[in-house]
Amino acid sequence: MLRILIVDDQQLMRDGLRTIVDLEPDMRVVGTAADGAAARELAATLDPDVILMDIQMPVMDGVEATRLILRDDPGVFIVALTTFDDTEQIVRVLAAGARTYLLKDLPSDRLLDTIRSTVRGDVVMQPEIAARLVEAARRDPDAVPDSETDESRLLLELSPREREVLSLMVRGMSNREIASELFLSEGTVKNHISTIYSKMGVSDRTTAVLLAMRGGLQGGNV
């Protein structure tokens, strides 16, 4: 049973998310909070598996709350869930340690699937969020492809198939979608991703994707 903590400054949103989550047989909402400071206190006492974290809130925003909660408990999974798709916010909350960033207008079944995927380690960004990060990487001079950059050298360590898998990760595809696209089993895709993490020296999908984009690998490019 996944224990879920909901953090949002809008009562209607908290109530709606609780209703959606509590209908699932494998999930249970253990608490709700209206700001980041309250979320940090509840996270320490309720021991949630997953926190659905709003970004813009009074008292303490979701970025700072994410950073502090993960400092206290690195094992909790934080999913940023917000109405804003501002690129700076996306980068800040992912840098703080959030496993993924979702917009609140996504279908409820996609949200529930993402919660389960997050706990499995198969974290996926919505295509529009991935597109924002790709665009940011293109505008950032440090992200311009350069064979002398550390990120580019890391990509050269990958096999052609591993770069192909990573490029689809940049596009925001899940393991299942990558398997379908490349006519592979999900197990094979997971093995490729584990090897990618090892070669790149990372431990999560978001960091691998950001490093890939900084090294010049855009979705679909191998």
Image (cartoon, rainbow, N blue to C red):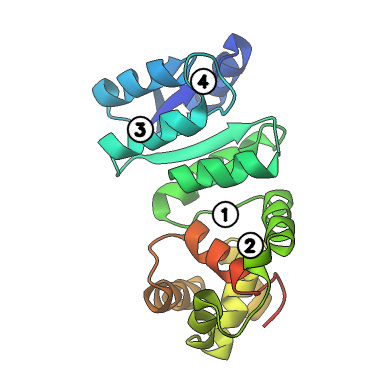
Q: At numbered mark 3, what does the secondary structure look like: helix, strand or loop?
A: helix
Residue 5 picture location, percent across and down: 41, 26
Numbered-mark total: 4
The answer to whether the residues at label 1 and label 2 have Cβ atoms under 8 Å apart is: yes
Give the Cα separation between the discs numbered 2 and 3.
29 Å
Q: At numbered mark 2, what does the secondary structure look like: helix, strand or loop?
A: loop
The answer to whether the residues at label 1 and label 4 have Cβ atoms under 8 Å apart is: no
Q: On the image, numbered disc 4 is attached to which residue?
A: 18
**Residue 168 quadrant:** bottom right
Give the Cα separation between the discs numbered 1 and 3.
23 Å
Disc marking residue 124: 1
Question: In what quadrant of the picture does the C terminus appear?
Answer: bottom right
Disc marking residue 68: 3
Residue 146 picture location, percent across and down: 63, 80
The answer to whether the residues at label 1 and label 3 have Cβ atoms under 8 Å apart is: no
Task: Check the image and name the residue furthest to the top.
Answer: 11
Q: At numbered mark 1, what does the secondary structure look like: helix, strand or loop?
A: loop
Give the Cα separation between the discs numbered 1 and 4.
22 Å
Q: Earlier in the sequence, mark 3 or mark 4?
A: 4
Please name the residue shown 58% across and 33% down the image: 81
Please name the residue shown 51% across and 57% down the image: 206
Give the Cα separation between the discs numbered 2 and 4.
27 Å
Q: Which of marks 2 and 3 is nearer the N terminus?
A: 3
Q: Is residue 102 placed above or below 15 in the rendered structure?
A: below
Look at label 1 and name its amino acid.
Val
Residue 58 picture location, percent across and down: 54, 14
Q: Which of marks 1 and 3 is nearer the N terminus?
A: 3
Q: Between residue 56 and residue 148, name the one nearer to us.
A: 148
Disc marking residue 173: 2
Look at label 3 and name its amino acid.
Leu
